[in-house]
Amino acid sequence: MESLGEFLAMGGYAAYVWSSYALSAAVLAGLWLTALRRKRDSRRKVAALNEDRQ
Amino acid sequence: MGTSVYATLGRLASPPVFYRIAEASRIWLIGLFLLLFIPGIYGALIGAPPDYQQGEGYRIIFVHVPAAWMSLFIYVNMAGMAAVSLIWRGKTAAICARASAPAGAAFTALTLATGSIWGKPMWGTWWVWDARLTSELILLFIYLGYMALVASIPDRRTAAAAGAILLLVGLINIPVIHFSVDWWNTLHQPATIAKFGAPSIDKAMLMPLLLMAGSFMVFYLAVMATMAQALLLEQEASSQWAKQAAS
């Protein structure tokens, strides 16, 4: 790699390469956050359910 | 020996044990993901040399191909777990199939999107209705159809059975996707790695590709395990272990 500018330019394919990587990052982050939120919500739901019963 | 293997699998499939193992393994899966992903992304963007035909534009391969592999792997894995849940009525197997669907759909959508972005500069078009692209799009619809079907049936067992049958019927699409590039004329290039004979790709490009694929695989396991935990908790809400796990 010669310079940061050249690296970012990706030989003229910057828009295609970086949008692909950005989309991939968004998909991974989205999945992970969804999974964590889903689990947190379930724990709350089950905890609330059992408090009601007591 | 056969008995002990089945006994071990049976214990692993018990909801509280699965929940505990998923809880304890999360940090290790995250660590393993980073261990594969960091050198993978470095190789993908910097380490690997430019392609002799596509220059730097080919670097999309390092996200597109691992995503495509995952779209197929997750489907086959779901169909396998669905079969297990049908045959042995396994609760945890049914839940793991269900917990895999969002990741499967997301990787399929990512495959289509990055493929489209790659197609524009190299083929001159975002999309072509050929066998490879069309069968991958059908895979996305099968994932979405499965999720809608399972969500629409309130009874857990009926939902699992209906979902399992849909997954097993849809399995026919998987070899069609894989062999489509050999069976029909297409703009899409043929297989580079998963074919008979040596992979036709340089080591400096193969290594980051495998690292990225490995990291996606570990990532899927972590997401699936976490979503399965959520589904198990809700399903077993009134049991003693679920009360403890939620408190």
Image: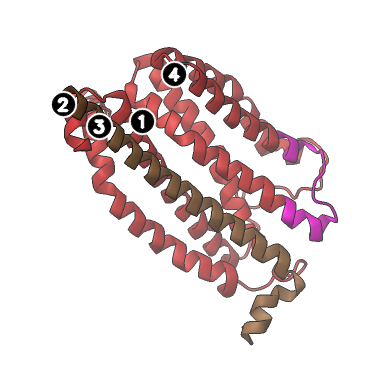
Check if mark 2 and mark 4 are on a common chain.
yes
Chain B takes which shade in the image?
red
Nearer the camera: disc 1 or disc 4? 1
In three-dimensional space, the C-alpha distance between marks 3 and 1, rounded to whole angstroms, equals 16 Å
| Residues marked 1 and 2 touching at CB (< 8 Å) | no
**Vertical order, A14 against B218 (above or below):** below
Residue at numbered disc 4? B160
At label 4, the amino acid type is Ala
Residue B134 x/y as whole percent: 74, 36
| Residues marked 3 and 4 touching at CB (< 8 Å) | no
Residue at numbered disc 1? B231
| Residues marked 2 and 4 touching at CB (< 8 Å) | no
Asked whether residue A41 is in view, the answer is yes
Nearer the camera: disc 3 or disc 1? 3
Residue at x-position 59% and y-position 65%: B205
| Figure quadrant of residue B201 | bottom right
At label 2, the amino acid type is Gln
Asked whether residue B195 is in view, the answer is no
* Crowd tier of the residue under label 1, counting other residues whose Cα lies within 10 Å: few below 14, some 14–19, many 20 or above: many
Residue B207 x/y as whole percent: 52, 63
Residue at numbered disc 2? B240
Q: Earlier in the sequence, mark 1 or mark 4?
A: 4
Chain painted brown = A
Residue at x-position 61% and y-position 28%: B142
At label 1, the amino acid type is Leu
| Figure quadrant of residue B112 | top right
Q: Earlier in the sequence, mark 1 or mark 2?
A: 1
